[in-house]
């Protein structure tokens, strides 16, 4: 196989996000429900025989050592693969939004190159590589909506009713490290109960990072207030700055009062690349 084109990398929404503690190494212990949505980056892969990893960006230029490049190199290093890849990234998911775009790109890169290079690594092996790249990468490799615990590596697939969502990305972005590093962040939530969440998954709990994020990016509060003025239950996803709300019976939303990016999305049944890794059996 010489090339793989138009490989999707979907975004995610955190339906809730609670922090229950912090490990000695600084990583936060969390509980969340991650949901895949149909807002996707697109990647294209072509084999190189010189072992080099190169990336071309369609749209705004990304840092040279982004998660896509790091994922490709990590896969080379773990397997000793002598092949390389020329990767084209069509970035559609906003950055610094809490939508998981970078982690999703990394996961799709691992899945695609595992196939393109004929490595046939099982999912468990890709998961170990993915966790070293970022706490959200294993979720995208798992390929399904999930109840998430630990630092993001403990995943339990969940089912969710089909729904449409409005996602609003304010102009400002946020650093995940700056939000999680805030001294005012609440880190002692009581453990969430999955059965209670399942009774009303689109309104359960809260996002523990939201108040800190609003202090760093006031646009988040204005976006939430705008969605609430439309009768929608809005909250932030991840560490921000994007906010979202289930639409229910509402067919469309008006133009926002500020130049924000607004997208109507559906939740996915499963990641489009589910099953691309070799079986763990």
Image: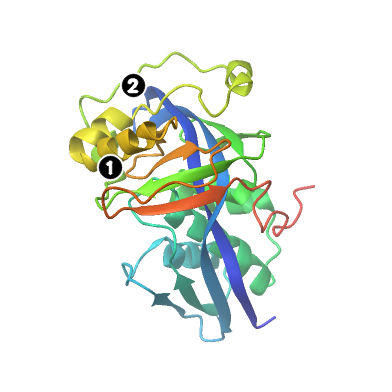
**Helix, strand or loop at mark 2:** loop
Residue marked by disc 1: 177
Percent across and percent down for residue 18 are: 42, 25
Toward the top, the furthest residue is 190
Q: Nearer the viewer, residue 161 or 251?
A: 251
Direction from residue 57 to residue 76 in the image, left or right: right
Q: Nearer the viewer, residue 166 or 280?
A: 166
Based on the displayed image, in which of its 4 quarters is residue 224 positioned? top left
Residue pictured at 61% horizontal, 67% vertical: 112
Toward the bottom, the furthest residue is 49
Residue pictured at 53% horizontal, 53% vertical: 129
Residue marked by disc 2: 187
Q: Can residue 222 be seen?
A: yes
Way the structure is coloured: rainbow
Q: Nearer the viewer, residue 240 or 117?
A: 240
Residue pictured at 37% horizontal, 73% vertical: 59
Percent across and percent down for residue 266 are: 58, 48
Dot 2 alpha-carbon crowd within 10 angstroms: few under 14, some 14 to 19, many 20 or more? some
Cα separation between marks 2 and 1: 15 Å
Percent across and percent down for residue 138 are: 55, 46
Dot 1 alpha-carbon crowd within 10 angstroms: few under 14, some 14 to 19, many 20 or more? few
For residue 63, above or below residue 52: above
């Amino acid at each position: 196989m010489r090339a793989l084109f138009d490989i999707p990398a979907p975004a995610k929404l955190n339906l809730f996000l609670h922090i229950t503690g912090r490990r000695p190494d600084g990583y936060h212990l969390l509980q969340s429900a991650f949901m895949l949505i149909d807002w996707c980056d697109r990647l294209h892969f072509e084999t190189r025989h010189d072992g080099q990893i190169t990336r071309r960006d369609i749209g705004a230029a990304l840092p040279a050592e982004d998660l896509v490049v790091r994922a490709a190199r990590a896969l080379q290093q773990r397997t000793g693969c002598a092949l390389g890849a020329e990767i084209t990234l069509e970035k559609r998911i906003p950055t610094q939004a809490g939508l998981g775009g970078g982690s999703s790109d990394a996961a799709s890169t691992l899945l695609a190159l595992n196939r393109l290079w004929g490595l046939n690594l099982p999912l468990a092996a890709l998961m170990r590589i993915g966790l070293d790249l970022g706490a959200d990468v294993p979720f995208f490799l798992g390929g399904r909506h999930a109840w998430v615990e630990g630092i993001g590596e403990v995943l339990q697939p969940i089912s969710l009713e089909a729904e449409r969502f409005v996602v609003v990305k304010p102009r400002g972005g946020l650093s995940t490290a700056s939000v999680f590093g805030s001294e005012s962040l609440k880190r002692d939530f009581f453990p969430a109960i999955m059965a209670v969440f399942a009774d009303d998954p689109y309104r359960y709990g809260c996002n523990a990072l939201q108040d800190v994020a609003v202090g760093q990016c006031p646009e988040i509060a204005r976006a939430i207030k705008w969605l609430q003025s439309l009768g929608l239950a809005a909250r932030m996803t991840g560490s921000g700055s994007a906010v979202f709300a289930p639409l229910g019976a509402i067919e469309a939303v008006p133009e926002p009062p500020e130049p924000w990016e607004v997208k109507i999305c559906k939740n996915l049944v499963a990641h489009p690349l589910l099953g691309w890794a070799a079986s763990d059996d």
